[in-house]
Image (cartoon, helix red, strand yellow):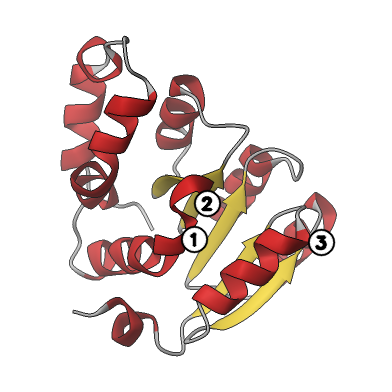
């Protein structure tokens, strides 16, 4: 299904401390109903008081992993979006701590596709990480060039791709 159709009317929270990033994401997800937060405190308040179909969380600047924990407690799937926090360690930590997706801000123009991947996988009771590997595996192979990020954690990633979402 086309991302725009799948996302039409979905309620999404975006938390990022950069106002230009918030503005760009709001524009890219204009088919959705969007709330934004520029701080951890504001993001926490919204996650705890509003129902969302998806949360897009920055890692750095807004305590993204703390917000991920709150999103998980409220059964809100979370897409981690980061620039400065882009690392093998944060990728694995995102997956371990229950994120549905881990996207680089370098690919932010594809946010609607990523968000649709998450919602479609959940709707079909499939792992959100399967589509993630299809779409972004090559990006991370280049980004983490010279490392064996997939091979070193092969059992972990194989299981993550098979595991159904807990949302």
Residue occupying the point 20% across, 62% down: 125
**Res 117 → quadrant:** bottom left
Residue 75, label in figure: 1
The image shows residue 14 at horizontal and vertical percentages of 63, 64
Question: Which label's residue is closer to the chain start, 3 or 1?
Answer: 3
Q: Single out the mark in the foreground, 2 or 3.
A: 3
**Labels in figure, total:** 3
Q: Regarding mark 2 in the picture, which secondary structure is present there?
A: helix
Question: Which label's residue is closer to the chain start, 2 or 3?
Answer: 3
Does the image show residue 93?
yes
Q: CA distance from mark 3 to mark 1?
A: 18 Å
Residue occupying the point 50% across, 77% down: 29
Please name the residue that numbered disc 3 is placed on: 42
Query: Is residue 138 or residue 129 the one in the foreground?
Result: 138
Residue occupying the point 39% across, 65% down: 115
**Label 1 close to label 2 by CB (< 8 Å):** yes
Please name the residue that numbered disc 2 is placed on: 72
Quick check: 117 above or below 29?
A: above
């Amino acid at each position: 299904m086309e991302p725009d159709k799948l996302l039409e009317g979905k309620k999404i929270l975006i938390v990022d401390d950069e106002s230009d990033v918030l503005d760009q994401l709001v524009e890219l997800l204009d088919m959705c109903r969007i709330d934004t937060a520029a701080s951890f405190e504001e993001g926490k308040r919204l996650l705890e008081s509003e129902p969302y179909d998806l949360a897009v969380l920055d890692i750095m600047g807004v305590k993204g992993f703390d917000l991920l924990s709150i999103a998980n407690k409220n059964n809100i799937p979370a897409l981690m979006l980061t620039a400065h926090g882009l690392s093998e360690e944060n990728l694995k930590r995102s997956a371990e701590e229950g994120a549905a997706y881990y996207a680089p801000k370098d690919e932010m123009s594809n946010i609607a596709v990523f968000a649709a991947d998450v919602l479609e996988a959940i709707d079909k009771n499939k792992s959100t990480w399967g589509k993630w590997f299809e779409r972004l595996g090559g990006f991370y192979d280049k980004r983490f060039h010279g490392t064996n990020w997939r091979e070193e954690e092969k059992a972990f990633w194989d299981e993550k791709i098979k595991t159904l979402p807990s949302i």
